[in-house]
Image: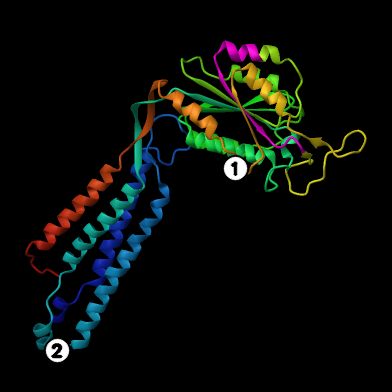
Amino acid sequence: MPSKTFKYRMPLFLSSVLILELAFWLLAWQMLKIFGVFSSHEGGEHLMFLYPKYAWWFLIVPFLMGVFIYQLYKRNQLVEGLGNMKTLRTFMRTVSTKNVFIRYFFIRNVFVFAVFALMQPAFGTKTLKGTSSGVELIFAVDISNSMNTRDITGGETRLTVAKRAMNQLVNNSTASRVGLLIFAGNAYPQLPLTADKEAAKMYIDELNTSFISNQGTNMSAALEEASNFFSKEKSKKVLVLITDGEDHEGGMEKAYADIQKKNINVFVLGIGTEKGGIVPESEVPNALSLKDEMGRSVISKVNYQMLEEIAKELNGEVLLSNESFPNVSKFLTQINTSSGTNTVDLEFKVNENKYQWPLGFALLSLLILMVWEAAPKRVHN
């Protein structure tokens, strides 16, 4: 029928598109498999996507396919509606199914490779060099039951405020590495020194008083553990001791000597009030109070005198806060101003981003499409 030159060959276009997509995604799957994208092990170099969540954008391919098919279908309907060949030749142009397929091919390539670029494929590693503050910042945090006391303005627990203070120091200090240890009746490392501040804040946020069953406030153990927690590098070392100072078990002389021997700068942050408050059994609101041997509720008071003594012995600074958002600017000023003359050279190994490759294919497809669209064409249905 002569009118076929005015109509698209729908079965041909649809079969060509399906074969193209099937071949492309099978090849893509094989290539990704070869480069270890689906491998469960982490050893050796393999391709990975830094932002795999953008893979949802591949759904644009069936949408694009549907748009093309719909347009071709509507065109064919219009041609069938006119019917008369003389009318068709007067008002309609002949069409080429092949040209439409080529147009689809390059347009879908632009979108597909742009999505791969958004996913940011990374393969191998590269070394970056830089300098950073040579300050090592370690928190020694009291997580004894008394840190559940709610004598803070606003009714929050002492530990909640301690976490907030630590996050402020992590966010605003120029420390290059951060570490965390916890103590109650004993002291334990919680997070070794790390340059990953987001990981440090995650560990801080997860702290609770159930981590250590042996209760008490053994600050001598905390100071001794902290003195061994720093690296042996020539860098400024800062210890922030966070406690309510409610009780301690002696043996402070050796702990003082260890801290002083290693030139560790100490800041003492006392959380709570000297008036004190009832110690609950847990951090849950409205929890029952702890009882002493006489059946009376246990009261915890901040021992500010003892905190001052620790700071004095270690030539440090002390700050007492019962606010929901403690003002730690006093500590930050000293940490940050002293860090300017203590810099260290660092080398970081990072995943080498290869987003340029798929982005290059997307731009090349767009360029070819533009040139092809501008070129004169013969119509072959």
Is-magenta flag for residue 269? yes
Is-magenta flag for residue 232? no
Residue density around tag 2, few if under 14, some if 14–19, many if 20 or more, within 10 Å? few
Q: Position of residue 58 (x, y in %)?
A: 36, 56
Q: Compare residues 161 and 21 and report the one nearer the observer.
A: 161
Q: Position of residue 318 (x, y in %)?
A: 62, 27
Q: Tell me the residue that label 2 is attached to.
A: 84
Q: Tell me the residue that label 1 is attached to.
A: 325
How far apart are the alpha carbons under marks 2 and 1?
82 Å
Q: Secondary structure at mark 1?
A: loop
Taking the image as drawn, is residue 175 in sight?
Answer: no
Stretch in magenta: 256-276
Quadrant where the C terminus is found in the figure: bottom left
Q: Position of residue 83 (x, y in %)?
A: 18, 87
Q: Compare residues 65 and 338 and report the one nearer the observer.
A: 338
Would residue 223 appear left or right of 303 to someone viewing this image?
Answer: left
- Residue located 28% across and 70% down the image: 69
Q: Compare residues 352 and 265 and report the one nearer the observer.
A: 265
